[in-house]
Image (cartoon, rainbow, N blue to C red):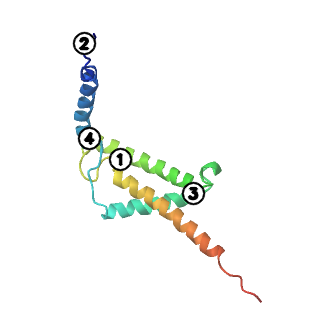
Amino acid sequence: MDPPTRPWRASAPVWMVVLALSVAAARAPAQWLDPDACVTCPDKRIHFAAGVGLDLLARGPWVAKGFHDHACKRVLVTATVAASWEMLDALQARREGKAGRPGYGFGPLDFAATVAGAATAEALQALGRKILRRRPVASP
């Protein structure tokens, strides 16, 4: 007869790794993330407007045709630029020793506001196209 197995002993190293990562993860926001949680603050409106502007700029000739021929691609280009900007902001905040303070570091809400601005611009343009197509033609 085999002795009873104890699966929790085999998973002990896994739990130690999970515990170590959770302890390290508690420090990560203080080092890289912007703790700003204000959704209606002026800087979020600025990020929203920047998202609209970036989406409009993504239609220009400086972006390859393959990257701006569909709405989802333009939003993706805007998201890439926004994520790059936020990462540069996080690196600058780390260099200056300000990371972890409100307004400094990678701002997930700032990123989300920028992408929401781009998505809103695309939705408004699609709605405008739909409305203009339904216009009745006046007969002479």
Answer left or right for 126 relative to 19: right
Residue under pointer 2: 3
- Mark 2 secondary-structure assignment: loop
- Amino acid type of disc 1? Asp
The quarter of the picture where residue 115 lies is bottom left
Distance of label 3 from label 1 (alpha carbons): 27 Å
Disc with the residue nearer the chain's start (3 vs 1): 3
Q: Which residue is found at the position 24% from the left and 46% from the top?
A: 100
Q: Return the x and y of residue 78 as percentages of the image width and height.
A: 49, 53
Q: Earlier in the sequence, mark 3 or mark 4?
A: 4
Q: Alpha-carbon neighbours of circle 1 within 10 Å: few (<14), some, or many (≥20)?
A: many
Name the kind of residue labelled 2 in the image.
Answer: Pro
How far separated are the C-alphas under marks 2 and 1? 58 Å
- Neighbourhood count class around disc 3 (C-alpha, 10 Å): few under 14, some 14–19, many 20 upward: many
The residue to which callout 3 is attached is 71
Residue nearest the viewer, comparing 82 with 62: 82
- Select label 3 or label 4 by which is in front: 3
129 sits left or right of 29 in the view: right
In the image: residue 22, left or right of residue 79: left
> Considering only order in the chain, which callout, 1 or 2, is on the residue closer to the N terminus?
2
Q: Position of residue 131 (x, y in %)?
A: 60, 74
Q: Residue furthest right?
A: 140
